[in-house]
Amino acid sequence: IKHIGILTSGGDAPGMNAAIRAIVIAAHHYKIAVFGFYAGFNGLIDDESVLLSDKAVAHIIHKGGTILKSARCPTMKTSLGIAQATSTLMKEKIDGLIVIGGDGSFTGLLALQKQWSGQVIGIPGTIDNDIDGSDFSIGFSTAINTAIEAIDKIRDTAEAFERIFIVELMGRNSGHITYNVGIACAAEQIISFENFATKNQTASEQEKLLALAKEIKLAQANRHASYIIVLAENLWQGGATALAQQLQTLANIDCTACILGHIQRGGSPVAKDRILATKLGVGAVQAMIAGKSNIMIAEQNNAVAHVALQTAIMHQQGVSNNLVQAQENILALTAQRL
Ligand code: F6P
């Protein structure tokens, strides 16, 4: 192997720069040149890349975002896009491609692999943590810490005004951020796919709202205090704003909606993400040298593991039952003390 290509794709995640750095350092050690393609798969389609030097990746480990830029790339879903990407890889004499991204990015990688004979390796990088076969994806730990910090601040003002807040959190269709943040912030309610959507599946939206209103009123009757509901995005139609309005109309409950949004994607990566990205970046280069292809390099039980890309994209990794149970337990214990 003489040349590898790397790109960051999909929603950026803190720690992507740390992964780029590790890949470049490891590749240079083995005398391999690294081409960084810009803006996800668009860089492959438009043949826009930069030869990454040691200097280019010095002092980027602490930076959020990605020096290579990221993007979603609908063209990569077309045969023309795949053909253009393949032609760039051949023209630039790339022997292997490493993509840091989520399941959409891995799907693009698999499509590419069908047309191109080079090696392909994925590294899980998404704040959503929904990649199957990977204990944690790069960016998740930073995102939850950012959200926790923000909600702790919301708690201060909620306490001062004895207000009810509905805080909407990212995660696309998964509840990892919502569940972890909800427990860590001692949210009074977690509304996520794992509990709200699956429990009482037969209940109508109206019945679910009434049950929620009842719980809020019960808490209010027991103590005058703040009340924080964390809500997974894409779960409730219209999100936090709609839910707040509906609680007002239905039960005369005053709620303040707060959509945390892209703040969750930014910021300097926490230690856990920097270390994870460093391990996975080096692991990806070593796997490539060992001739591996069509795999995701991930961490499982603290060790670097190789997972078939096909397996990684087959299912979305769900929130563990242990975590759901932990929330149920603490809620039950809290209720007993009211
Ligand atoms: O996948 C990361 C993520 O931040 C999701 O949590 C969110 O649903 C989505 O990306 C938002 O995407 P965009 O920045 O393109 O609006």
Image (cartoon, grey):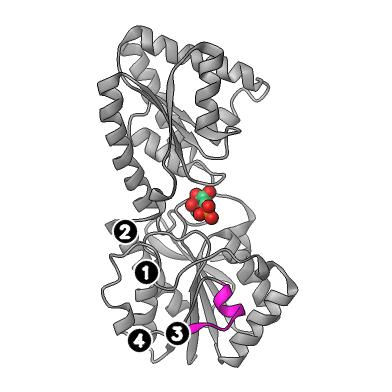
Q: Is residue 237 above or below residue 289?
A: above
Q: CA distance from mark 3 to mark 2?
A: 24 Å
Viewport quadrant of the C terminus: top left
User: Which element type, helix, strand or loop, lies under badge 1?
Assistant: helix
Q: Marks 4 and 3: in contact by CB < 8 Å?
A: no
Q: Identify residue type, mark 1.
A: Asn
Q: Marks 1 and 2: in contact by CB < 8 Å?
A: yes
Q: Nearer the viewer, residue 307 or 81?
A: 81
Using residue 50 as the reference point, say whether residue 173 is left or right of it. right
Range drawn in magenta: 41-49
> Which residue lies under the disc numbered 3?
50
Q: CA distance from mark 1 to mark 4?
A: 14 Å
In the rendered structure, does residue 21 fall within the stretch colored magenta? no
N-terminal of the two: label 3 or label 1? 1
> Which residue lies under the disc numbered 2?
269
State the image quarter where residue 229 is shown.
top left
Q: Identify residue type, mark 3.
A: Val
- Circle 4 crowding by C-alpha within 10 Å: few under 14, some 14–19, many from 20: some
